[in-house]
Image (cartoon, rainbow, N blue to C red):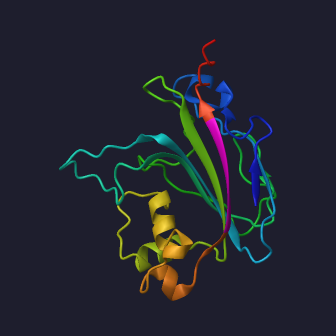
Amino acid sequence: MILTSPRFENNGPIPKEYTCEGVPEDAPHVSPPLEWSGVPPEAQSLFLIVDDADAVEEVPPGSGRYYPHPNKPWVHWVLYNIPPDASGLPAGGRPLPEGPPRTLEGVDIRERRGYRGPCPPDGRSHHYFFKLYAVNWVIDVDKVFRDLNRPRPWKAGLSKADLLEYLGYPRIAIRVGSPAYSHRYRIIDEAKLVGTYPPPPPPAD
């Protein structure tokens, strides 16, 4: 598969309008438009994960908060059950064409739904990974939690960790006895687009 955006090139800067600095305070962030092609014909659905490889969520000891994989890249957005015949996402929108199976929104690293744009607190240029996965099943949220033997405390949907653990990611490391091994749910193909924000400084003369 190939994943692109009409608003920025791979490894190029993400326009400010798609970041926390591009909207008024407390206003919903606007996701950039995305386009893709080459979805395998056997795909039953797609899911999208956006994360920041240069920022991690630090979980204080004894905080009582539930993070199965702490100190991992900061997750900004999760979408799943995107129809396999969809060819992209409009800015700030849902996949087109709409229809069953209905696209669902997962939760970010703070258990919130919705897109959170780039907002690096340290002022450095960060790398934001937009990753699209084609899978051979339509994701059933309740079944995922049952098979992982995991409760659903105050969650509105699946997280990146839930999805990838259930699928035994990476594909070459599916462990015997895992839900992915038992049910043969798997990632068929994947594509990646990387953007930066803020733009890195120009090289010194």
Residue 191 within the segment the image draws in magenta: yes
Q: State the residue at coordinates (56%, 38%).
A: 127
For this orientation, the residue located farthest to the front is 205
Is residue 40 positioned above or below 196 on the image? below
User: In which image quadrant can residue 137 be found?
Assistant: bottom right
User: In which image quadrant can residue 191 be found?
Assistant: bottom right
Q: State the residue at coordinates (41%, 46%).
A: 110
Q: Quadrant of the C terminus?
A: top right
Q: Is residue 23 visible?
A: no
Q: In the figure, is residue 67 to the left or right of 3?
A: left
Q: Is residue 205 visible?
A: yes
Frontmost residue, 162 versus 2: 2
Residue 117 within the segment the image draws in magenta: no
Is residue 4 positioned above or below 199 on the image? below
Q: Quadrant of the N terminus?
A: bottom right
Q: Which residues are magenta?
A: 189-195
